[in-house]
Image: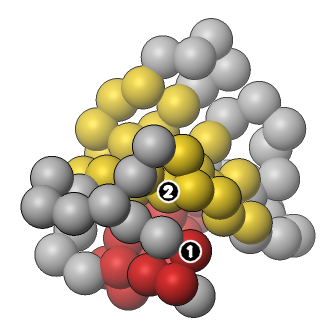
C-alpha cells in the first residue's frame, strides 16, 4: 500500500508505505499531528481504484493506493 499527500498545488508525494488500512489511518493522524493540523472530520471517496481522503483542509488531501487491488470505501470503514 502507498500513502500519498497532495498539496494545494496538486503535487503528490509519498509519506508512507503502510501494510494495513489501520496503519494508513495512523500515518495520516501522525502527519496531521506533525503539521499541527486539527481535523474535525474525515471523509473518503473512491477514485479510479484509489481512496481519496479529505481531512478538512479544503485544498490538501491524502491518497491511498494499492498495487495489488482496487480499494473501495468498505476497505476504509
Residue drawn at x 62%, y 42% as measured from the top left: 61
Residue 55 percent location from the top left of the image: 73, 58
Question: Residue 14's quadrant in the figure?
Answer: top left
State which quarter of the image contains the N terminus: bottom left
Residue beneath the point at 58% across and 25% down: 7
Relative to residue 59, is residue 67 drawn left or right? left
Up the image or down, 60 lies above or below 62; here it is above
Q: Position of residue 37 (x, y in %)?
A: 72, 54
Q: Earlier in the sequence, mark 1 or mark 2?
A: 2
Q: Is residue 65 visible?
A: yes
Q: Is residue 10 above or below residue 5?
A: above
Give residue 51's mark.
Answer: 2
Give the image location of residue 41, x and y in percent: 83, 70
| Viewer-side residue, 11 vs 48 | 48
- Residue under the image location 38 percent in, 42 percent down: 4
Provide the secondary structure element on which disc 2 rests.
strand
Amino acid at each position: 500500500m502507498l500513502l500519498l499527500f497532495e498539496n494545494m498545488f496538486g503535487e503528490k508525494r509519498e509519506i508512507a508505505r503502510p501494510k494495513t488500512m489501520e496503519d494508513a489511518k495512523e500515518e495520516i493522524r501522525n502527519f496531521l499531528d506533525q503539521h499541527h493540523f486539527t481535523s474535525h472530520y474525515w471523509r473518503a471517496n473512491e477514485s479510479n481504484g484509489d481512496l481519496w481522503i479529505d481531512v478538512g483542509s479544503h485544498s490538501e488531501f491524502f491518497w491511498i493506493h494499492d498495487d495489488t487491488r482496487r480499494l473501495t470505501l468498505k476497505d476504509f470503514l
